[in-house]
Image: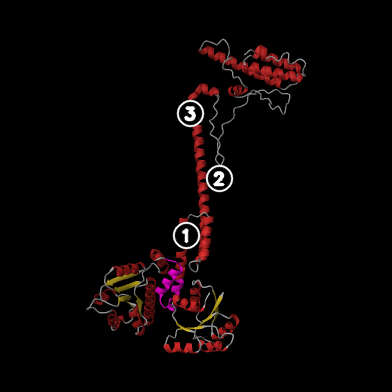
Amino acid sequence: MNGSQTNTAQGTAAGTSPKVAAKQCFLAADRFIKDARYREARLEIEKARRLDPANTYIPAFLDRIAYFEQQQKKERGNVSGKETPALHPSPQPAPSSAAGIQQKIPAAPKPAPVHSEEHPQAPHIAIPKPAPAPVHFSPASQPPVVGTRTEIPPIAPAFVPEEQMEHGAKSAMDVNLQEMKRQIQMLTHALEQEKKAREEMTSQHVHVATTQLRTALEQSWVNGAPNEQETIRLHELAVSLAIPDEAEQTILREVKLKMYSTAVKEVLSKRRLLRSSSSTMEWLRKVYQISMSEYLEYETKFLLDLIADQYKGTVLYVAPTNGSNDDLTRRLKTAGFAVVRAASPEEALGKIEKIYPNLILCQMEFAPGSLSGIKFLHLIRSTNKYTFLPFILICTTAEAGSLQSSELRPHEGFIQSPVDFDELIIVLNEKLLQLRDQISSLS
Amino acid sequence: MKKILLVEDDEDNRDLVSFVLQRSNLSVELVIAENGKEAVQKAVDDRPNLILMDMQMPVMDGWTAVPILKGDDRTKAIPIIAFTSQAKLEDKARTIEIGCVEHYAKPMDPEELLTLIRKYVHE
Protein backbone atom coordinates (compact mmCIF):
# COMPACT_ATOMS: atom_id res chain seq x y z
CA MET A 1 0.00 0.00 0.00
CA ASN A 2 1.33 3.41 -0.89
CA GLY A 3 0.72 4.97 2.49
CA SER A 4 2.69 8.17 1.99
CA GLN A 5 0.31 9.30 -0.71
CA THR A 6 -2.93 7.87 0.40
CA ASN A 7 -2.69 7.81 4.15
CA THR A 8 -1.65 11.33 4.95
CA ALA A 9 -4.22 13.95 5.81
CA GLN A 10 -1.86 16.71 4.86
CA GLY A 11 -3.26 19.01 2.29
CA THR A 12 -6.85 18.05 2.97
CA ALA A 13 -6.66 19.79 6.32
CA ALA A 14 -6.00 23.18 4.76
CA GLY A 15 -9.00 25.23 3.93
CA THR A 16 -11.33 23.26 6.14
CA SER A 17 -12.48 23.68 9.72
CA PRO A 18 -10.03 22.45 12.40
CA LYS A 19 -12.41 19.73 13.57
CA VAL A 20 -12.91 18.34 10.09
CA ALA A 21 -9.18 18.53 9.45
CA ALA A 22 -8.50 16.72 12.74
CA LYS A 23 -10.96 14.00 11.68
CA GLN A 24 -8.97 13.54 8.48
CA CYS A 25 -5.85 13.16 10.62
CA PHE A 26 -7.51 10.47 12.72
CA LEU A 27 -8.55 8.56 9.59
CA ALA A 28 -5.00 8.75 8.26
CA ALA A 29 -3.62 7.60 11.60
CA ASP A 30 -5.99 4.66 11.56
CA ARG A 31 -4.72 3.60 8.17
CA PHE A 32 -1.11 3.90 9.36
CA ILE A 33 -1.88 1.73 12.39
CA LYS A 34 -3.32 -0.94 10.14
CA ASP A 35 -0.12 -0.89 8.14
CA ALA A 36 1.94 -1.04 11.33
CA ARG A 37 3.46 2.35 10.53
CA TYR A 38 3.19 3.67 14.04
CA ARG A 39 5.55 6.58 13.71
CA GLU A 40 3.53 8.11 10.86
CA ALA A 41 0.41 7.43 12.87
CA ARG A 42 1.83 9.42 15.79
CA LEU A 43 2.61 12.30 13.46
CA GLU A 44 -1.00 12.39 12.25
CA ILE A 45 -2.23 12.45 15.83
CA GLU A 46 0.13 15.32 16.63
CA LYS A 47 -1.30 17.20 13.68
CA ALA A 48 -4.80 16.51 14.98
CA ARG A 49 -3.74 17.82 18.42
CA ARG A 50 -2.61 21.08 16.88
CA LEU A 51 -5.89 21.41 15.00
CA ASP A 52 -8.24 20.36 17.77
CA PRO A 53 -6.40 20.09 21.08
CA ALA A 54 -9.51 19.19 23.11
CA ASN A 55 -10.49 16.20 20.96
CA THR A 56 -10.96 13.17 23.23
CA TYR A 57 -9.74 10.76 20.57
CA ILE A 58 -6.18 12.04 20.78
CA PRO A 59 -5.19 10.22 24.02
CA ALA A 60 -7.12 7.13 22.94
CA PHE A 61 -5.21 6.98 19.67
CA LEU A 62 -1.89 7.52 21.38
CA ASP A 63 -2.62 4.70 23.83
CA ARG A 64 -3.62 2.49 20.96
CA ILE A 65 -0.46 3.21 19.03
CA ALA A 66 1.60 2.54 22.15
CA TYR A 67 -0.15 -0.76 22.66
CA PHE A 68 0.57 -1.88 19.09
CA GLU A 69 4.18 -0.85 19.34
CA GLN A 70 4.54 -2.84 22.50
CA GLN A 71 2.92 -5.87 20.88
CA GLN A 72 5.23 -5.54 17.93
CA LYS A 73 8.22 -5.54 20.20
CA LYS A 74 7.02 -8.67 21.99
CA GLU A 75 6.47 -10.50 18.72
CA ARG A 76 9.91 -9.59 17.51
CA GLY A 77 11.41 -10.86 20.74
CA ASN A 78 9.57 -14.20 20.41
CA VAL A 79 10.46 -14.70 16.81
CA SER A 80 14.10 -13.87 17.31
CA GLY A 81 14.29 -16.53 20.00
CA LYS A 82 13.08 -19.24 17.60
CA GLU A 83 13.66 -18.22 14.03
CA THR A 84 15.44 -15.67 11.99
CA PRO A 85 13.85 -12.31 12.73
CA ALA A 86 11.74 -10.87 10.00
CA LEU A 87 12.94 -7.69 8.41
CA HIS A 88 9.51 -6.16 8.54
CA PRO A 89 7.40 -6.55 11.64
CA SER A 90 4.19 -7.92 10.25
CA PRO A 91 2.91 -6.05 7.31
CA GLN A 92 1.48 -9.16 5.59
CA PRO A 93 -0.67 -10.61 8.36
CA ALA A 94 -1.88 -7.22 9.40
CA PRO A 95 -5.61 -7.11 9.00
CA SER A 96 -6.93 -4.86 6.31
CA SER A 97 -10.03 -3.86 8.10
CA ALA A 98 -11.17 -2.68 11.45
CA ALA A 99 -12.84 -6.03 11.98
CA GLY A 100 -9.46 -7.67 11.55
CA ILE A 101 -8.00 -5.57 14.28
CA GLN A 102 -10.99 -6.31 16.40
CA GLN A 103 -10.41 -9.99 15.98
CA LYS A 104 -6.73 -9.80 16.74
CA ILE A 105 -6.84 -7.60 19.77
CA PRO A 106 -8.91 -8.80 22.63
CA ALA A 107 -9.32 -5.54 24.46
CA ALA A 108 -8.48 -1.92 24.02
CA PRO A 109 -6.52 -0.23 26.71
CA LYS A 110 -9.10 2.51 26.91
CA PRO A 111 -12.22 2.10 24.88
CA ALA A 112 -13.30 5.30 23.27
CA PRO A 113 -16.79 6.26 22.19
CA VAL A 114 -17.47 5.29 18.61
CA HIS A 115 -21.02 6.36 17.95
CA SER A 116 -21.05 9.11 15.41
CA GLU A 117 -24.53 10.14 16.53
CA GLU A 118 -23.12 11.10 19.91
CA HIS A 119 -20.03 12.68 18.36
CA PRO A 120 -20.89 13.73 14.86
CA GLN A 121 -17.46 15.10 14.33
CA ALA A 122 -15.71 11.95 15.39
CA PRO A 123 -14.31 9.79 12.63
CA HIS A 124 -15.43 6.23 12.18
CA ILE A 125 -12.66 4.54 14.03
CA ALA A 126 -12.39 0.88 14.74
CA ILE A 127 -11.88 0.81 18.45
CA PRO A 128 -10.75 -2.52 19.74
CA LYS A 129 -13.64 -4.14 21.58
CA PRO A 130 -13.95 -7.37 23.41
CA ALA A 131 -15.11 -10.18 21.21
CA PRO A 132 -18.73 -11.09 21.62
CA ALA A 133 -19.30 -13.53 24.36
CA PRO A 134 -20.43 -16.96 23.25
CA VAL A 135 -24.16 -17.27 23.13
CA HIS A 136 -25.32 -19.67 25.79
CA PHE A 137 -28.79 -21.02 25.34
CA SER A 138 -30.38 -21.40 28.70
CA PRO A 139 -33.60 -23.33 28.45
CA ALA A 140 -36.41 -21.82 30.40
CA SER A 141 -36.95 -23.37 33.75
CA GLN A 142 -40.64 -23.50 32.96
CA PRO A 143 -41.88 -25.68 30.09
CA PRO A 144 -42.71 -23.78 26.93
CA VAL A 145 -45.99 -21.97 27.12
CA VAL A 146 -48.59 -23.62 24.96
CA GLY A 147 -49.26 -21.63 21.87
CA THR A 148 -45.97 -19.79 21.79
CA ARG A 149 -42.89 -20.73 19.95
CA THR A 150 -39.75 -21.42 21.90
CA GLU A 151 -36.87 -19.35 20.62
CA ILE A 152 -33.93 -21.54 19.88
CA PRO A 153 -30.71 -19.63 19.40
CA PRO A 154 -28.13 -20.76 16.91
CA ILE A 155 -25.31 -22.85 18.20
CA ALA A 156 -22.34 -20.58 18.74
CA PRO A 157 -18.86 -21.85 19.21
CA ALA A 158 -17.19 -20.74 22.38
CA PHE A 159 -14.89 -17.79 21.94
CA VAL A 160 -11.30 -18.72 22.17
CA PRO A 161 -8.78 -15.95 21.83
CA GLU A 162 -6.36 -16.32 18.98
CA GLU A 163 -3.49 -16.16 21.38
CA GLN A 164 -4.85 -19.12 23.25
CA MET A 165 -5.30 -20.95 19.98
CA GLU A 166 -1.63 -20.43 19.17
CA HIS A 167 -0.44 -21.70 22.51
CA GLY A 168 -2.92 -24.49 23.04
CA ALA A 169 -4.87 -25.05 19.86
CA LYS A 170 -5.76 -28.56 20.81
CA SER A 171 -7.13 -27.69 24.21
CA ALA A 172 -9.03 -24.76 22.72
CA MET A 173 -10.63 -27.08 20.20
CA ASP A 174 -11.58 -29.37 23.03
CA VAL A 175 -13.15 -26.51 24.92
CA ASN A 176 -15.01 -25.53 21.77
CA LEU A 177 -16.29 -29.04 21.25
CA GLN A 178 -17.31 -29.39 24.86
CA GLU A 179 -19.20 -26.14 24.69
CA MET A 180 -20.96 -27.15 21.49
CA LYS A 181 -21.82 -30.49 22.99
CA ARG A 182 -23.27 -28.80 26.04
CA GLN A 183 -25.35 -26.50 23.88
CA ILE A 184 -26.63 -29.41 21.79
CA GLN A 185 -27.66 -31.19 24.96
CA MET A 186 -29.49 -28.11 26.12
CA LEU A 187 -31.21 -27.74 22.76
CA THR A 188 -32.22 -31.39 22.81
CA HIS A 189 -33.62 -30.95 26.28
CA ALA A 190 -35.51 -27.84 25.21
CA LEU A 191 -36.91 -29.63 22.17
CA GLU A 192 -38.01 -32.54 24.32
CA GLN A 193 -39.76 -30.15 26.66
CA GLU A 194 -41.49 -28.47 23.76
CA LYS A 195 -42.52 -31.85 22.33
CA LYS A 196 -43.86 -32.89 25.72
CA ALA A 197 -45.78 -29.65 26.04
CA ARG A 198 -47.27 -30.12 22.58
CA GLU A 199 -48.25 -33.69 23.41
CA GLU A 200 -49.87 -32.51 26.63
CA MET A 201 -51.67 -29.82 24.68
CA THR A 202 -52.90 -32.37 22.14
CA SER A 203 -53.91 -34.76 24.86
CA GLN A 204 -55.76 -32.00 26.70
CA HIS A 205 -57.50 -30.96 23.51
CA VAL A 206 -58.55 -34.53 22.77
CA HIS A 207 -59.76 -34.97 26.33
CA VAL A 208 -61.84 -31.81 26.20
CA ALA A 209 -63.26 -32.72 22.80
CA THR A 210 -64.15 -36.28 23.73
CA THR A 211 -65.69 -35.15 27.02
CA GLN A 212 -67.82 -32.64 25.14
CA LEU A 213 -68.95 -35.27 22.65
CA ARG A 214 -69.56 -37.82 25.38
CA THR A 215 -71.73 -35.40 27.35
CA ALA A 216 -73.76 -34.56 24.25
CA LEU A 217 -74.16 -38.25 23.42
CA GLU A 218 -75.24 -39.10 26.95
CA GLN A 219 -77.89 -36.41 26.87
CA SER A 220 -79.19 -37.66 23.54
CA TRP A 221 -79.03 -41.37 24.39
CA VAL A 222 -80.47 -41.28 27.89
CA ASN A 223 -83.84 -42.54 26.68
CA GLY A 224 -82.60 -44.66 23.83
CA ALA A 225 -81.34 -44.09 20.31
CA PRO A 226 -81.95 -40.51 19.16
CA ASN A 227 -83.79 -39.69 15.96
CA GLU A 228 -82.05 -39.19 12.63
CA GLN A 229 -81.84 -35.42 12.92
CA GLU A 230 -80.21 -35.65 16.34
CA THR A 231 -77.83 -38.33 15.10
CA ILE A 232 -76.69 -36.03 12.30
CA ARG A 233 -76.23 -33.18 14.76
CA LEU A 234 -74.09 -35.37 17.01
CA HIS A 235 -71.96 -36.48 14.09
CA GLU A 236 -71.47 -32.87 13.02
CA LEU A 237 -70.42 -32.03 16.56
CA ALA A 238 -67.82 -34.81 16.44
CA VAL A 239 -66.53 -33.47 13.11
CA SER A 240 -66.33 -29.92 14.44
CA LEU A 241 -64.35 -31.20 17.43
CA ALA A 242 -61.95 -32.94 15.04
CA ILE A 243 -62.73 -36.33 16.53
CA PRO A 244 -61.88 -39.11 14.07
CA ASP A 245 -64.69 -41.40 12.92
CA GLU A 246 -63.21 -44.40 14.68
CA ALA A 247 -62.99 -42.56 18.00
CA GLU A 248 -66.50 -41.22 17.52
CA GLN A 249 -67.82 -44.75 17.04
CA THR A 250 -65.99 -45.98 20.12
CA ILE A 251 -67.38 -43.20 22.28
CA LEU A 252 -70.86 -43.75 20.87
CA ARG A 253 -70.64 -47.46 21.64
CA GLU A 254 -69.48 -46.80 25.19
CA VAL A 255 -72.22 -44.25 25.78
CA LYS A 256 -75.04 -46.38 24.48
CA LEU A 257 -73.88 -49.37 26.49
CA LYS A 258 -73.66 -47.21 29.58
CA MET A 259 -77.15 -45.85 29.01
CA TYR A 260 -78.44 -49.33 28.31
CA SER A 261 -76.80 -50.64 31.45
CA THR A 262 -78.45 -47.92 33.53
CA ALA A 263 -81.83 -48.70 31.99
CA VAL A 264 -81.37 -52.43 32.65
CA LYS A 265 -80.68 -51.76 36.31
CA GLU A 266 -83.72 -49.53 36.57
CA VAL A 267 -85.93 -52.14 34.94
CA LEU A 268 -84.57 -54.97 37.06
CA SER A 269 -85.33 -53.04 40.21
CA LYS A 270 -88.99 -53.11 39.10
CA ARG A 271 -88.93 -56.63 37.84
CA ARG A 272 -91.99 -57.68 39.85
CA LEU A 273 -94.07 -55.29 37.75
CA LEU A 274 -92.94 -56.77 34.46
CA ARG A 275 -94.41 -59.73 32.73
CA SER A 276 -91.08 -60.98 31.52
CA SER A 277 -87.61 -59.69 32.22
CA SER A 278 -86.22 -61.31 29.12
CA SER A 279 -88.73 -59.69 26.75
CA THR A 280 -88.16 -56.36 28.52
CA MET A 281 -84.43 -56.76 28.04
CA GLU A 282 -85.01 -57.51 24.41
CA TRP A 283 -87.11 -54.36 24.08
CA LEU A 284 -84.39 -52.35 25.78
CA ARG A 285 -81.80 -53.76 23.42
CA LYS A 286 -83.91 -52.47 20.53
CA VAL A 287 -84.41 -49.09 22.20
CA TYR A 288 -80.67 -48.68 22.68
CA GLN A 289 -79.74 -50.43 19.42
CA ILE A 290 -77.61 -52.97 21.25
CA SER A 291 -76.56 -55.82 19.03
CA MET A 292 -76.37 -59.30 20.47
CA SER A 293 -72.59 -59.30 20.12
CA GLU A 294 -72.38 -56.02 22.03
CA TYR A 295 -74.68 -57.40 24.66
CA LEU A 296 -72.60 -60.53 25.12
CA GLU A 297 -69.36 -58.62 25.07
CA TYR A 298 -70.43 -56.26 27.82
CA GLU A 299 -72.64 -58.65 29.73
CA THR A 300 -70.01 -59.44 32.30
CA LYS A 301 -69.47 -55.75 32.86
CA PHE A 302 -73.18 -55.23 33.49
CA LEU A 303 -73.33 -58.21 35.79
CA LEU A 304 -70.46 -56.95 37.84
CA ASP A 305 -72.65 -54.02 38.78
CA LEU A 306 -75.49 -56.30 39.69
CA ILE A 307 -73.73 -58.85 41.82
CA ALA A 308 -71.23 -58.71 44.60
CA ASP A 309 -68.02 -60.55 44.18
CA GLN A 310 -68.54 -62.87 47.10
CA TYR A 311 -69.89 -66.29 47.95
CA LYS A 312 -73.63 -66.29 47.45
CA GLY A 313 -74.44 -69.89 48.28
CA THR A 314 -74.29 -73.37 46.81
CA VAL A 315 -76.51 -74.22 43.85
CA LEU A 316 -77.27 -77.78 42.89
CA TYR A 317 -77.79 -77.48 39.16
CA VAL A 318 -79.66 -80.46 37.77
CA ALA A 319 -79.41 -80.53 33.98
CA PRO A 320 -77.93 -82.76 31.29
CA THR A 321 -74.37 -81.96 30.35
CA ASN A 322 -74.26 -79.79 27.23
CA GLY A 323 -72.73 -76.57 26.03
CA SER A 324 -75.43 -74.16 27.16
CA ASN A 325 -75.74 -75.77 30.59
CA ASP A 326 -71.97 -75.64 31.02
CA ASP A 327 -72.06 -71.98 30.10
CA LEU A 328 -74.75 -71.30 32.69
CA THR A 329 -72.63 -73.10 35.28
CA ARG A 330 -69.67 -70.92 34.48
CA ARG A 331 -71.71 -67.76 34.72
CA LEU A 332 -73.26 -68.78 38.00
CA LYS A 333 -69.78 -69.33 39.40
CA THR A 334 -68.73 -65.92 38.11
CA ALA A 335 -71.76 -64.47 39.87
CA GLY A 336 -70.53 -65.82 43.20
CA PHE A 337 -72.29 -69.17 43.52
CA ALA A 338 -70.69 -72.51 44.21
CA VAL A 339 -72.22 -74.81 41.61
CA VAL A 340 -72.53 -78.58 41.88
CA ARG A 341 -73.73 -80.33 38.74
CA ALA A 342 -76.01 -83.35 38.50
CA ALA A 343 -77.00 -84.73 35.11
CA SER A 344 -80.29 -86.15 36.40
CA PRO A 345 -82.60 -85.95 39.46
CA GLU A 346 -81.34 -89.36 40.53
CA GLU A 347 -77.76 -88.16 40.55
CA ALA A 348 -78.92 -85.01 42.36
CA LEU A 349 -80.50 -87.07 45.12
CA GLY A 350 -77.17 -88.75 45.65
CA LYS A 351 -75.31 -85.45 45.90
CA ILE A 352 -77.78 -83.46 47.96
CA GLU A 353 -76.86 -85.31 51.16
CA LYS A 354 -73.22 -84.50 50.70
CA ILE A 355 -73.25 -80.88 49.69
CA TYR A 356 -76.24 -79.38 51.51
CA PRO A 357 -77.13 -76.94 48.72
CA ASN A 358 -78.78 -73.61 49.40
CA LEU A 359 -80.84 -73.88 46.23
CA ILE A 360 -81.76 -76.37 43.53
CA LEU A 361 -81.95 -75.26 39.93
CA CYS A 362 -83.52 -77.96 37.83
CA GLN A 363 -84.67 -78.53 34.28
CA MET A 364 -88.18 -79.85 33.60
CA GLU A 365 -87.42 -82.68 31.22
CA PHE A 366 -84.83 -85.44 31.37
CA ALA A 367 -84.12 -88.59 29.42
CA PRO A 368 -86.83 -91.30 29.41
CA GLY A 369 -86.72 -93.41 32.55
CA SER A 370 -85.55 -90.50 34.65
CA LEU A 371 -87.63 -88.37 37.00
CA SER A 372 -89.06 -85.14 35.56
CA GLY A 373 -88.30 -81.82 37.17
CA ILE A 374 -91.78 -81.58 38.69
CA LYS A 375 -91.55 -85.07 40.21
CA PHE A 376 -88.16 -84.24 41.62
CA LEU A 377 -89.64 -81.06 43.13
CA HIS A 378 -92.40 -83.07 44.82
CA LEU A 379 -89.85 -85.55 46.10
CA ILE A 380 -87.82 -82.77 47.66
CA ARG A 381 -90.91 -81.18 49.18
CA SER A 382 -91.88 -84.43 50.78
CA THR A 383 -88.54 -84.71 52.56
CA ASN A 384 -88.82 -82.87 55.87
CA LYS A 385 -85.30 -81.55 56.05
CA TYR A 386 -85.63 -79.97 52.58
CA THR A 387 -89.06 -78.46 53.06
CA PHE A 388 -87.74 -74.91 52.77
CA LEU A 389 -85.01 -75.58 50.25
CA PRO A 390 -85.50 -73.11 47.36
CA PHE A 391 -86.26 -74.86 44.12
CA ILE A 392 -86.22 -73.19 40.70
CA LEU A 393 -87.48 -74.97 37.61
CA ILE A 394 -86.26 -74.11 34.14
CA CYS A 395 -89.20 -74.59 31.77
CA THR A 396 -90.54 -73.77 28.33
CA THR A 397 -93.22 -71.12 27.75
CA ALA A 398 -95.90 -73.78 27.49
CA GLU A 399 -94.76 -75.42 30.72
CA ALA A 400 -94.71 -72.00 32.40
CA GLY A 401 -98.46 -71.66 31.75
CA SER A 402 -99.22 -74.83 33.68
CA LEU A 403 -96.80 -73.91 36.44
CA GLN A 404 -98.50 -70.53 36.93
CA SER A 405 -101.76 -72.25 37.66
CA SER A 406 -100.14 -74.83 39.90
CA GLU A 407 -99.40 -74.02 43.49
CA LEU A 408 -95.77 -73.16 43.82
CA ARG A 409 -94.68 -72.38 47.32
CA PRO A 410 -93.03 -69.04 48.13
CA HIS A 411 -89.55 -70.52 48.11
CA GLU A 412 -90.18 -72.19 44.78
CA GLY A 413 -90.21 -70.62 41.37
CA PHE A 414 -89.57 -71.05 37.71
CA ILE A 415 -87.70 -69.33 34.95
CA GLN A 416 -88.36 -69.65 31.26
CA SER A 417 -85.95 -71.15 28.81
CA PRO A 418 -83.82 -69.82 27.17
CA VAL A 419 -82.63 -68.48 30.47
CA ASP A 420 -82.13 -64.74 30.80
CA PHE A 421 -79.17 -64.71 33.12
CA ASP A 422 -79.99 -61.32 34.66
CA GLU A 423 -83.44 -62.58 35.51
CA LEU A 424 -82.07 -65.85 36.86
CA ILE A 425 -79.71 -64.02 39.20
CA ILE A 426 -82.57 -61.93 40.53
CA VAL A 427 -84.75 -65.01 41.07
CA LEU A 428 -81.93 -66.84 42.83
CA ASN A 429 -81.26 -63.87 45.08
CA GLU A 430 -84.93 -63.54 45.92
CA LYS A 431 -85.26 -67.17 46.85
CA LEU A 432 -82.11 -67.17 48.92
CA LEU A 433 -83.34 -64.10 50.74
CA GLN A 434 -86.59 -65.90 51.50
CA LEU A 435 -84.63 -68.89 52.79
CA ARG A 436 -82.60 -66.63 55.04
CA ASP A 437 -85.74 -65.03 56.42
CA GLN A 438 -87.34 -68.43 56.89
CA ILE A 439 -84.37 -69.76 58.85
CA SER A 440 -84.23 -66.54 60.90
CA SER A 441 -87.90 -66.84 61.81
CA LEU A 442 -87.40 -70.46 62.92
CA SER A 443 -84.68 -69.51 65.33
CA MET B 1 -98.05 -32.78 21.93
CA LYS B 2 -100.47 -35.54 22.89
CA LYS B 3 -101.29 -36.18 26.54
CA ILE B 4 -101.74 -39.44 28.41
CA LEU B 5 -103.33 -39.46 31.83
CA LEU B 6 -101.99 -42.30 33.97
CA VAL B 7 -104.19 -43.06 36.94
CA GLU B 8 -102.14 -45.26 39.26
CA ASP B 9 -101.63 -45.34 43.02
CA ASP B 10 -98.44 -47.44 42.95
CA GLU B 11 -95.38 -45.27 42.55
CA ASP B 12 -93.25 -48.02 41.04
CA ASN B 13 -95.87 -48.67 38.40
CA ARG B 14 -96.06 -44.98 37.60
CA ASP B 15 -92.29 -44.84 37.28
CA LEU B 16 -92.25 -47.88 35.04
CA VAL B 17 -94.90 -46.54 32.67
CA SER B 18 -93.02 -43.25 32.57
CA PHE B 19 -89.79 -45.11 31.89
CA VAL B 20 -91.37 -47.02 29.02
CA LEU B 21 -93.00 -43.95 27.48
CA GLN B 22 -89.77 -41.97 27.64
CA ARG B 23 -88.10 -44.67 25.58
CA SER B 24 -90.93 -45.06 23.10
CA ASN B 25 -90.16 -42.25 20.65
CA LEU B 26 -93.74 -41.19 21.23
CA SER B 27 -94.00 -37.47 21.66
CA VAL B 28 -96.41 -37.52 24.56
CA GLU B 29 -96.83 -35.74 27.85
CA LEU B 30 -97.61 -37.95 30.82
CA VAL B 31 -100.06 -36.54 33.36
CA ILE B 32 -100.31 -38.41 36.65
CA ALA B 33 -103.27 -38.94 38.96
CA GLU B 34 -103.01 -41.12 42.06
CA ASN B 35 -106.68 -42.01 42.37
CA GLY B 36 -109.99 -41.83 40.53
CA LYS B 37 -111.08 -38.55 42.05
CA GLU B 38 -107.92 -36.81 40.99
CA ALA B 39 -108.25 -38.43 37.56
CA VAL B 40 -111.71 -36.98 36.98
CA GLN B 41 -110.46 -33.49 37.78
CA LYS B 42 -107.31 -33.80 35.64
CA ALA B 43 -109.26 -35.25 32.74
CA VAL B 44 -111.43 -32.13 32.73
CA ASP B 45 -108.48 -29.76 33.17
CA ASP B 46 -105.95 -31.38 30.85
CA ARG B 47 -108.16 -33.08 28.27
CA PRO B 48 -105.79 -35.99 27.67
CA ASN B 49 -105.84 -38.03 24.48
CA LEU B 50 -105.81 -41.31 26.40
CA ILE B 51 -106.36 -42.48 29.97
CA LEU B 52 -104.61 -45.48 31.50
CA MET B 53 -106.75 -46.36 34.49
CA ASP B 54 -105.81 -48.65 37.34
CA MET B 55 -109.00 -50.15 38.69
CA GLN B 56 -107.98 -50.79 42.30
CA MET B 57 -107.12 -47.54 44.04
CA PRO B 58 -107.78 -45.76 47.30
CA VAL B 59 -110.11 -42.70 47.57
CA MET B 60 -111.90 -43.52 44.31
CA ASP B 61 -111.29 -46.66 42.28
CA GLY B 62 -111.45 -47.05 38.53
CA TRP B 63 -114.80 -48.77 38.65
CA THR B 64 -116.27 -45.54 39.98
CA ALA B 65 -114.17 -43.05 38.05
CA VAL B 66 -114.71 -44.50 34.56
CA PRO B 67 -118.52 -44.11 34.60
CA ILE B 68 -118.12 -40.54 35.84
CA LEU B 69 -115.74 -39.74 32.99
CA LYS B 70 -117.98 -41.43 30.46
CA GLY B 71 -120.97 -39.50 31.78
CA ASP B 72 -119.32 -36.12 31.38
CA ASP B 73 -119.60 -34.52 27.93
CA ARG B 74 -116.17 -32.97 28.35
CA THR B 75 -114.44 -36.30 28.90
CA LYS B 76 -116.64 -39.00 27.45
CA ALA B 77 -114.74 -39.10 24.15
CA ILE B 78 -111.42 -39.82 25.80
CA PRO B 79 -110.49 -43.49 25.33
CA ILE B 80 -109.80 -45.27 28.62
CA ILE B 81 -107.67 -48.39 28.93
CA ALA B 82 -108.25 -50.39 32.07
CA PHE B 83 -104.82 -51.04 33.50
CA THR B 84 -105.32 -53.69 36.10
CA SER B 85 -103.95 -56.78 37.74
CA GLN B 86 -107.37 -58.36 37.59
CA ALA B 87 -106.91 -60.78 34.75
CA LYS B 88 -110.11 -62.81 34.92
CA LEU B 89 -112.36 -62.84 31.87
CA GLU B 90 -115.31 -61.43 33.78
CA ASP B 91 -113.19 -58.48 34.90
CA LYS B 92 -112.25 -57.80 31.32
CA ALA B 93 -115.88 -57.91 30.20
CA ARG B 94 -116.89 -55.61 33.04
CA THR B 95 -114.32 -52.95 32.18
CA ILE B 96 -115.57 -52.89 28.58
CA GLU B 97 -119.10 -52.67 29.88
CA ILE B 98 -118.42 -49.52 31.92
CA GLY B 99 -116.84 -47.78 28.96
CA CYS B 100 -113.16 -48.80 28.71
CA VAL B 101 -111.89 -49.41 25.20
CA GLU B 102 -109.30 -51.98 26.24
CA HIS B 103 -108.33 -54.09 29.20
CA TYR B 104 -104.62 -54.48 29.84
CA ALA B 105 -103.56 -56.95 32.49
CA LYS B 106 -100.56 -56.32 34.68
CA PRO B 107 -97.73 -57.16 34.95
CA MET B 108 -96.87 -55.16 31.90
CA ASP B 109 -94.82 -55.91 28.88
CA PRO B 110 -93.26 -52.70 27.53
CA GLU B 111 -93.61 -53.48 23.84
CA GLU B 112 -97.16 -54.72 24.24
CA LEU B 113 -98.20 -51.68 26.24
CA LEU B 114 -96.65 -49.32 23.70
CA THR B 115 -98.41 -51.06 20.84
CA LEU B 116 -101.70 -50.56 22.65
CA ILE B 117 -100.97 -46.91 23.40
CA ARG B 118 -99.97 -46.22 19.81
CA LYS B 119 -103.32 -47.58 18.73
CA TYR B 120 -105.06 -44.70 20.49
CA VAL B 121 -102.48 -41.97 20.41
CA HIS B 122 -101.72 -41.06 16.84
CA GLU B 123 -98.94 -38.58 16.52
Q: Quadrant of residue B5?
A: bottom right
Residue A285 part of the magenta segment? yes
Q: Type of residue at label 3? A: Asp
Contact check, label 3 and label 2, Cβ < 8 Å? no
Residue depth check, mark 3 versus mark 1: number of the one nearer the observer: 1
| A173 versus B13 height, above or below | above
Tag nearer the camera, 3 or 2: 2
The numbered mark at residue A251 is: 1
Type of secondary structure dominating the magenta stretch = helix
- Give me the residue at 31% from left, 70% from top: A339
Q: Quadrant of the C terminus of chain A?
A: bottom left
Kindly identify which residue carries mark 2.
A144
The three-letter amino acid code for the residue at tag 1 is Ile
**In the rendered view, would you say A161 is above or below A270?**
above
SS category of the residue bearing label 3 = helix
Real-space Cα separation, disc 3 to disc 1, in angstroms: 58 Å
Pinpoint residue A364: horizontal percent, then vertical percent.
29, 78
Q: Name the residue under label 3.
A: A174
Check disc 3: other Cα within 10 Å, few if <14, some if 14-19, many if 20+. Answer: few
Q: Is residue B12 in view?
A: no
The answer to whether the residue labelled 2 contacts the one labelled 1, judged by CB atoms less than 8 Å apart, is no
Front-most of residues B24 and A97: B24
Q: Is mark 2 on a helix, strand or loop?
A: loop
Q: Quadrant of residue A113?
A: top right
> Viewed as shown, does residue A151 lie left or right of B88?
right
Secondary structure state at the residue bearing disc 1: helix
Q: What stretch is highlighted in magenta?
A: A265-290
Mark 1 closeness class: few <14, some 14–19, many ≥20 residues within 10 Å: some
On the same chain: label 2 and label 1? Answer: yes
Comes first in the chain, label 2 or label 1: 2
Q: Where is residue A165 in the image (x, y as percent from the top left)?
A: 52, 23
Q: Which amino acid does label 2 sit on?
A: Pro
